[in-house]
Image: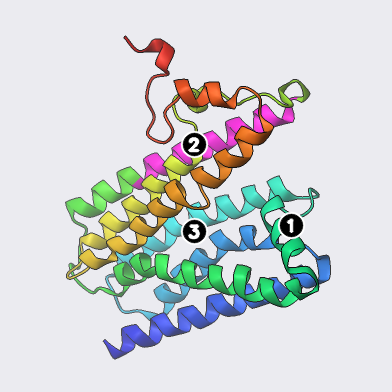
Amino acid sequence: MQVSITIMSLNLAAVAAMMITGWFMSLVYRNVTIVDSLWGLGFVLIAWLTYAMSDGYEGRKLLIAMLVTMWGLRLSLYLSWRNWGKGEDPRYGGWRKMSGERFWLVSLFKVFILQALFLWVISLVLQIGQLAATPASFTWLDGLGVVIWASGFIFESIGDWQLAQFKSNPASKGRVMDRGLWAYTRHPNYFGEFLVWWGIFLITLSTPNSWWTILSPAIITVVLLKMTGIALTEKALLENRPGYSDYIKRTSAFVPWRPAKERK
């Protein structure tokens, strides 16, 4: 137990140091949007630090670290590419305006430290999964978790790619993305993220006394559905995209389903 607490404490310190470094960079560039790119990298950092420091079952340790790395690097690269040269995200711009000259300090706690804490709490599921020495073999829960993780990773990746292709077309300016996966769910990227974290939870659930790590995918689900995910995104889209209200009427918000016009 003492070893586990030490490892998790060191992970918290590491991800806090990474975010504070990001904060210093945001001061130089006057742009805190960099925190979005650091989000996925923070999980990768924790995954490999845990892998290096823990004595859990090697197969499961490597599996979790690899899955988290694939997801985190893809997300970080995608967000970095998407945000490159586009200035500060309007969310952070609004906070900068409200805080005025104090924003340089406010952003440290309200943006970077807060995300470090959120990141660490959510990462408990991947830390506990690697710390467990038993079972010293893969189980059916590991297999099911990989299948669900893979489904989410593919869904999220395709959704982001389709959206990027849509936005790159000048004819799409001001229009609503309602093609491909976006015809079946208004947020395929969020649904994919949801599956990714529930998949990792199932892998960890194969280890003893790990049921409580359901906290991690539960937090992700609440964030996606009620906080910075669907709720915040759709508020902005309703204000800036004519026709988005009609899109809402015919398309599932989260779980993929046939568009309303196709239902009998």
Residue depicted at x 37% and y 45%: 195
Secondary element at image label 3:
helix
Q: What is the crowding at mark 2: few (fewer than 14 residues within 10 Å), some, or many (at least 20)?
A: many
Q: Indicate the colouring scheme.
A: rainbow
Magenta residue check for 157: yes
Nearer to us in this view, 101 or 56 = 101
Magenta residue check for 32: no
Q: Which mark is residue 69?
A: 3
Q: Is residue 179 visible?
A: no
> What residue is shown with label 2?
187
Against 168, residue 110 (above or below) is: below
Residue depicted at x 41% and y 65%: 122
Secondary element at image label 1:
helix
- Cα distance between the residues tagged 3 and 2: 23 Å
Marks 1, 2: nearer the viewer: 1
Question: Where does the image place residue 239, in percent across and percent down from the top left?
Answer: 65, 35
Question: Where does the image place residue 49, in percent across and percent down from the top left?
Answer: 46, 75
> What residue is shown with label 1?
93
Q: Is residue 188 visible?
A: yes
Q: Identity of the amino acid at label 1?
A: Gly
Task: Residue lying at the far front in this picture: please name it.
Answer: 98
The N terminus: image quadrant: bottom left
Q: Which mark is residue 230?
A: none
Q: Are marks 1 and 2 in contact (CB under 8 Å)?
A: no
Read off the magenta span.
149-169
- Cα distance between the residues tagged 3 and 1: 30 Å
Q: What is the crowding at mark 1: few (fewer than 14 residues within 10 Å), some, or many (at least 20)?
A: some
Against 164, residue 3 (above or below) is: below
Sequence order check, earlier mark of 3 and 1: 3
